[in-house]
Structures are given as structure tokens and as C-alpha cells.
Image (cartoon, helix red, strand yellow):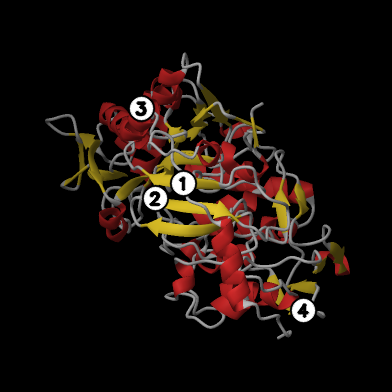
Amino acid sequence: MSTRRIRGAAVTAALAAAVTACSAPGSGGSDDDASAGSVSIAVASEPDTLSPLLGYGKDGNSKIFDGLLARDAGLKLKPALAAALPKVTDGGRTYTYTLREGVEFSDGEPLTADDVVYTYETVLDAKTNNTFKSELDAVKEVRAEGDDRVVFTLKYPYAPFAARTVLPIVPEHLAGKQDPNTGSFNTKPVGTGPYVLTKWSKGEKLTFEANPRYWGGAPKVRSFTMAIVADDNVRATRLRSGDLDGAVLPPNLAATFQNDDGKRTYEARSYDFRAVTLPTAGKVTGDRAIRRALDAAVDREAMVDRILDGAGRPAYGPLPVDDPAFSTSVERPRDLGKAKRILDEAGWKPGGDGIRVKDGQRASFTLLYPSGDKVRQDHALAYASDAKKAGIDVRVESATWEVIEPRMKDTAVLAGFGSIGDPDFGLYTLLHSSLAGDGFNNMARYDNPAVDRALDDARRSQDPDERRSAYEKVQRALVQDPGYTFLTHIDHMYVLADRWDGLNTQLEPHEHGFASGPWWNIEDWQPKK
């Protein structure tokens, strides 16, 4: 552990001087200059924690923290806390990073290599309750060489490892004194990022102020608020009333702002897909014939047109059609006749009410979707309608996540997934049997040895052709043995007051709101002249 400078009282005074209350739009605040430097944005949900040790910001773009690396608008890796991209040696088994000079945490303590080591070791510790350890499976050891150099030794060459080092770094001098699972750091984080959290009103909003110690310079947006508004319609109404500067909205509601001269709509391509989990423990969903029939019966094109207003693409699997690893061989049209043949051959015969029966078991199951999510509701209802045409009864129910989570083991869920950067990032946690039932990983508890082997082969190979071949095997296997019914890939829609320059979007993962969206680079925005 390196010696640190102690600045307690001075740091507190500096932060207090830097943090100023800013009025939200429509709040009646009189400080026009402060209001011009503040932004209020509504998102659908809030994180459970703000600690990277438990998963917050693990894919980058956290406003409180930085990783060794970050991504630019085109997702190209660039240095962040590291002074340069890593030096890679030993055939891809050793990655060496040199830290940027002069970086401080928002409490004034300097960033050192020990903080990096602490972060990664704690994330990988079996006692730390996170569900993304498998994403760093390749790491054998991480060690500090002096105050400014960090060396990662890998168990095997892992082609996309550098992209994993966007993981935010936490301060050992604070987090290291707490239980990572229950400590106050989870709700009162300290990082090196452009903003500091000043208030978190659970279920209502999080407020952030510019970090006066940020190594990247002072942001022009001096404060911003993330309002938690679960209901899509309420977000749209508050945005229309002027209570908000911006909001995440489904396509149909974003379209209602099309003629509003004071607002601008942003559409981001994404890896975010909607799918129905089909738990193997379910009496009906566990039947492979049922799963294959549902895959054939669903009308993906209609969902894109009618639910997403064209703002998306059919999902033939977890990878979008424009991903380099996508296998065109798995594109398939709706085939209701095929769905019926599959069920007939498997012994599922139509009953008197048209719903199929086998050995006294009706082809009927419940499908849960999160309350207030209109897009998921519409997907669930369309799915149920398509299923009924094949003789399968899907009963759609809304519920909170607190209700859904305990039932995920044996009840279908209209879920959302999708990670950017490399196929391994999304497919492994979605499909590998070793992660079945691990939180939201492998929610369907899918278990296919051939898929496991292909995922492991792709993870350990550095040959692009070998990796592409392995992922093609995965995608083909999912057609023959689906654990999910993949429905659509969704473009993310945002509407924002047109007051700032520098806004743009990235290709986005499933998670959006706190990390993605046009505000992914809010620290770089400039006020319109």
C-alpha cells in the first residue's frame, strides 16, 4: 500500500465550494446561469448499487468513475486512467498499463496502482456478490509495479481482454475498509470521474455535480439529475410539460415530439434485444418441441413494424444482423405451419378449445413482464397472440422485479439483454450452463454441452476465423434447441431539449439510461451559442 496525502478538511471545503444547487427546468429557480448549466433527464429504472465492485458501470461510461480505458463515439478503445493503451506481451497473456499522472479521486486522494489491484481482486473474490466474475475469468493475477504500473497475467490468451478494462476503478482507502456487499460505498461512491453524486433519493432521483478534481477538465454541464420514472407515459408527459430536459422513450412516444422545435430526437442502434426466457424447469417451457414451435410461430417482422414503429430489427438470435459474427444462415421467416407440425410430431394434440394437450398437460404457461414497460408489454401480448395460433396458451402478467425475480427459475419472462464490444461479452453470460440461475445470467437455465464447448473455444482462441466459426455453431444450435424466443433488437430513442452542442450516440448495450444515451459524453457538452 503506497503512502497517501491526507487532506480531509481542505478537500471537504473545496467540494462544498464547488457544489452549487441548480434549478431544474420548470422548477421556478431564479438563478438563470445555474439553470443553464444543469440538465434533468428521466430514465426508467435506477441501479441497485453505485459500486463497480458489484457491477455498476462495468461496461464503461460511468460519470462517477473511470476505467483504465474508455470508448470513443465509435467504440474504439482509448486511454482513460491509463496513460496509453496496454502493452501486450507473452503471446497475449500479459497486459501492462501505466497510469496517467496526477489523477485524484474526488476526495483528493491520489490514484495509484494499488487501487487498480484492489478493484480487480475484489471483483474476482468469491465472497463479493456480483454476477460478472465470469467476464474476467481469464485473469490469473493482477499486481502493482510501483505506484503507476499495473500488470495483468492471464490464464489463457483472451482476445477482447483490453475491452474488459473499462471496468471502473474504486479507491482502496475507502472501499477497502468496508464489506463490498453491504458497505456505505454502494450508495455513497467516490471516484475519479467527471461528476460526484450529491444526493440519492431512492425511487425518485439521483443528483450529480461536476467534480472539481476531474483530470479531464471542468464540464460545462455543472450538474445533472437522473429522475427515476418507471412509466413510459409519465416520462413523456413530464418532458412535454417542461419539467424535464430529456427522457428515454419508446419509439411510439418519441414520435410525438417530432414536430417540437425545442426538442431533438436521437436514435441509437443497439445490441439490446427482447426475448422470452423459456425455463427448462417449467412443465411446458421445458419441452423442446414447445420451444421450437414458438420460435417458428413468432412474427418478428410484425413486432418491429407495429411495436417499434420500424425502430429496430428482427432478432434471430442474440447477435444483431449487422454484427460481424452474425450467421446469415439463421435468418428465418415466420412459419406457422412448421410450428404446428413440430407440435403434432411431438404428441401435442389440439384440445377442444384449440389449446394443445400432451399426457394430460395443457400447453399453457405464464409470461411475466415488468410493470410500466409498454414496449415489453406489447411484445408479450404479440407473443401470446402468435403462440395461440399454434395452439399454445401464454398468459401474460405484469409484475414488479421484486415479484419477478423469485419466479424466474420456472416462469417465463419478457427479458432484455445485449452487450457491446465482443460476442463473448453477451453470449457467455446468456447461455453458458455454468451460469444457470446466477442472478440475471442465463435466466432460462439453458444447458447445451455443444454450446458450452463452442463458447469456451471462442473465449480461448485468438484466431478470428476460429472464433467466428464457434459463434456460428452457437447460433445454429439456438435454432434447433432454443432456450429463449428471440424477438427484436431495439433501437434506443431519446428526446432532449435542444440547448447543447456535442450530443451524439454510440452503439449501445441493453443497459441504457445511466451509462448510454446521448448523455454518455455529458462532460463534453457545450452550450449552444
Residue 217 horizontal/vertical position (percent): 72, 52
| Nearer to us in this view, 17 or 205 | 17
Disc 4 residue type (three-letter) = Ala
Q: In the figure, 125 relative to 283: above or below?
A: below
Residue 252 found in image quarter: top left
Q: Are marks 3 and 2 in contact (CB under 8 Å)?
A: no
Q: Which mark is residue 144?
A: 4
Q: Which mark is residue 205?
A: 2
Q: CA distance from mark 1 to mark 2?
A: 7 Å
Residue 43 horizontal/vertical position (percent): 43, 42
Q: Secondary structure at mark 3?
A: helix
Q: Secondary structure at mark 4?
A: strand
Q: Label 3 crowding class (10 Å Cα cut-off): few <14, some 14-19, many 20+?
A: few
Q: Sequence order check: which comes first, mark 3 or mark 4?
A: 4
- The residue singled out by tag 1 in the image is 225
Find the residue positioned furthest to the top: 259
Q: CA distance from mark 4 to mark 2?
A: 38 Å
Disc 1 residue type (three-letter) = Thr
Find the residue positioned furthest to the front: 30
Q: Sequence order check: which comes first, mark 3 or mark 2?
A: 2
